[in-house]
Image: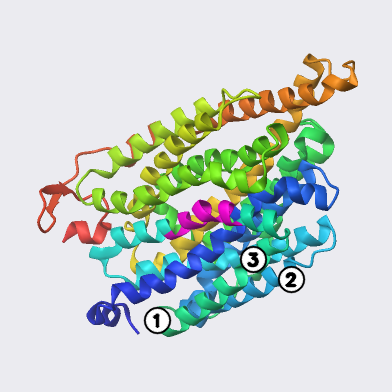
Amino acid sequence: MSPREIKERNLSFVPVMTAIFFGSVLATLGMSSISVAVPVLMEQFHTDLTAMQWTMTGYLLATGVVAPITGYLGDKYSTKYLYIAALIGYTLISGLSAFAWNIESLIAFRILQGIFGGMILPATMTILYQVIPREKQAFALSMWTLSTMLSPTFGPLLAGWLIGKFEWKWLFFMDIPFGIAAVAVAWRLIPYYKLNTPKTFDLPGLVTVILSSGSLLIAFSEVHAWGWSSWRMLSLLAFGILMLGCFIRRELMIPEPLLNLKVFVNVKYTVSLAVLAVITLNMYSGAFLIPVFLQNVQEVSALEVGLILFPATLAMAGVMPLVGKLYMRVAPQWLIVSGILLIAIGTFAIGRLNVNVSHGYIVMWLTIRYIGLSLTIMPLTNVGMEAIPRELSGHASSVNNWIRQVFGSFSIALFTSLIASRLTVHNQALDLDGAAETGRKLLKAEAFTLSSNDVYIVATMIVLVGFPLVWTLFRGKPRTERVAGHKLRPIQNLTQKEQLK
């Protein structure tokens, strides 16, 4: 089916969004649910936080590494079939993960799960921009973002209940019914179509992107143990940067690249992606550390962690449809700036924890932070994606997910290294080694709390980098258009070709 035929058919909005909805929930459930289980899995597999973080960073890195190939596979086999295959693979690996026998096998299964999960989200975003009519894409994206927020909303609560009621294996068993339902709905409701048919596969491009991402992630993960000036750290950084340069050079030169990096020529798309990367770095600091703080320092159960996180994530999901409607009435930059401000305020407040901080304090500032995420993610994504021609939307969505997932994995690795190094500093300052055995537990809790606060202060400074980037994204005086039933609004998200008409 050609783009013109897709537009002429004006495919039904609800069935396609329903099929996308199921897959997005499934893919994000694998990330959100395991955060609650980190202390439980550490005890189960007799490992430490540094090793345990690889169940999250390995998953995220795999989703980021596989993202570049999804554009090619979608073009070659149809995005519908790619989506269904990814759902089937994700569901099967989820079942296998429940039978992990040590931390190494769990990490391996999580990486495999991330490979399939990394195909799901780019595929759903591609379907959205290739099948949904342009006038409905902003609202469709808000609903797509809502689907990715439902797992962080209900995932920790459900995971906490399953761990408390049964055992950790149910974290993965619960994916199976979601996966079966997602496959059935996608097969029935998503139309078959192909916009491009690539002739060659860029294997060297895939190898270089895997080597670059893996080298840089390992370097950031182990910097606290090796040190910035160690030969291993410097070697991995140099090799990762070299491979990244080779990947970029190759993708720009060959006629049929694995990932069409020419989408970066569009300034609006590039800047919006840069702001999303900054927000992603900030976002994963809270997703990783808050559950660990609550369980290790305040000794609450996994179910209680889910209940504490629930109001904030529910607020984030509840605000998302409202953002989709506001997007049509309010200039996107005001939504984005307001969101960044709320994220910064919430993150800074969470960086002032103490060992006995009330759960109400955590809930309040997490809620403010998550509402800020709702105000930024959808407008930023849509501003960038609407500036890309439809035939390049598959590559643009792959780049979008590649950057976000790689930055997410780097974020967890970087903040894990940072908290490990700060723990060493605070343990020495509190004289942990010389303390009596009765007081060591309290001093450990105090050191971890202070280290977490240091991480949140760094995360606050990172997100503030987004402010000047937003103003470059919307600089200049835009023309206006009339949206049916509303006042004039800026034309900020049309492609260059459309703006010339």
Cα separation between marks 3 and 2: 14 Å
Tell me the amino acid under the disc marked 3.
Ile
Whole-percent x, y for residue 287 in the image? 58, 43
Local SS, label 2: helix
Q: Which residues are magenta?
A: 147-158
Per the image, the residue denoted by label 2 is 96
Packing grade of label 3 (10 A; few <14, some 14-19, many >=20) is: many
Tell me the amino acid under the disc marked 2.
Leu
Tell me the amino acid under the disc marked 1.
Leu
- Could you tell whether 264 is left or right of 302 in the image? left
Local SS, label 3: helix
Cα separation between marks 1 and 3: 24 Å
**Placement of the C terminus among the 4 image quadrants:** bottom left
Per the image, the residue denoted by label 3 is 115
Confirm whether the magenta stretch covers residue 259.
no
Residue 189 is tagged as 1
Whole-percent x, y for residue 60 in the image? 63, 55
